[in-house]
Amino acid sequence: MIINYRNIVRNDDNIIISGSASLVKNAYKPNPKGNHKGNHSKRVVVERLGKVLWIDPDDRMKGIFNSPKRGLVHYDLSLDLFTDVSPSDERLAGTKVHISEPSIHTNFGNSYLFFSELSRTPFMSVLRKSFGENTSLYQKVLAHVAHDCLRNGAAIKCGDFLKRDVLSCILSDVSYSALNCDSPYFRRCPMTISRCAFSKRFWRK
């Protein structure tokens, strides 16, 4: 992936006064005729980073952005890491821009519809029985399921996704940072005995 900067304009003090950026990746697009001639790659927007406020002078893979999804945020492409930034950060000195807060609970409709439909299947009841009294782990799995299905391809980690969703008011027993850390585990979780047991219960319903 790369950060695609557009229309960056600086003033006489070398402070960025306008410009936007997006996180993009190259996607292979085969020739629809089925032969190799004409195959090409196409840039696809993974996430819009919004207005550019600061770019690391030594490494253009790092910057501070006023993101429509995350608010004021620093992004490091080499680490694929988003971190919060204070409006008083010294790197923003001289920057005259209104720092807008991200929209909260923008995914209310998606989450409501998703879990309404999911509740019509045995999935929810089987999942709840599988974890017994371990409410925290049950809620954590629900968060990861929602994240995987509703993030719509955006490069946003599970905990960050939950902050922007109405589920943050419902799944109160989980930590945002923990969700971000254990995302790789849930993606690569092997077919353990517990997963096999869950699958057998589900298909008996």
Image: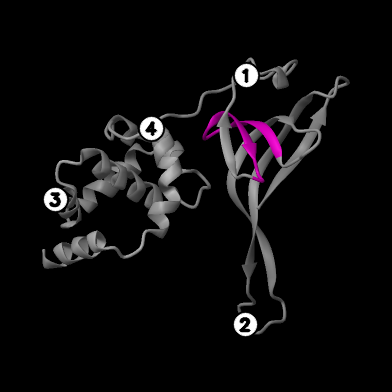
> Taking 103 as reference, is 5 left or right?
right
For label 1, the SS is: loop
Q: Which residue is mark 2?
A: 33
- Residue at 31 percent across and 65 percent down: it is 191
Residue 76 found in image quarter: top right
Q: Which residue is mark 1?
A: 98
**Distance from Cα at disc 1 to Cα at disc 2:** 49 Å
Q: Is residue 120 visible?
A: yes
Q: Residues within 10 Å of mark 4 (few under 14, many from 20)?
A: some
For label 2, the SS is: loop
**Distance from Cα at disc 3 to Cα at disc 2:** 50 Å
Residue range (magenta): 62-78
Q: Is residue 98 above or below residue 41?
A: above
The quadrant of the rendering that contains the C terminus is bottom left
Q: Which residue is mark 4?
A: 105
Residue 134 location (% of width, % of height): 20, 41
Of the two numbered discs 1 and 2 on the same chain, state the one appearing first in sequence.
2
In the orientation shown, which residue stands out farthest toward the bottom? 35
User: Does residue 137 show up magenta in the picture?
Assistant: no
Q: Amino acid at mark 2?
A: Lys
Q: Nearer the viewer, mark 3 or mark 4?
A: 3
In the orientation shown, which residue stands out farthest toward the front? 193
**Distance from Cα at disc 2 to Cα at disc 4:** 43 Å
**Distance from Cα at disc 3 to Cα at disc 1:** 48 Å
Tell which of 61 and 24 is nearer to you. Answer: 61
In terms of secondary structure, what is the magenta stretch mainly?
strand
Q: Residues within 10 Å of mark 2 (few under 14, many from 20)?
A: few
Q: Amino acid at mark 4?
A: His
Q: Amino acid at mark 1?
A: His
Q: Nearer the viewer, mark 3 or mark 1?
A: 3
Instruction: Indicate which disc residue 64 carries.
Output: none
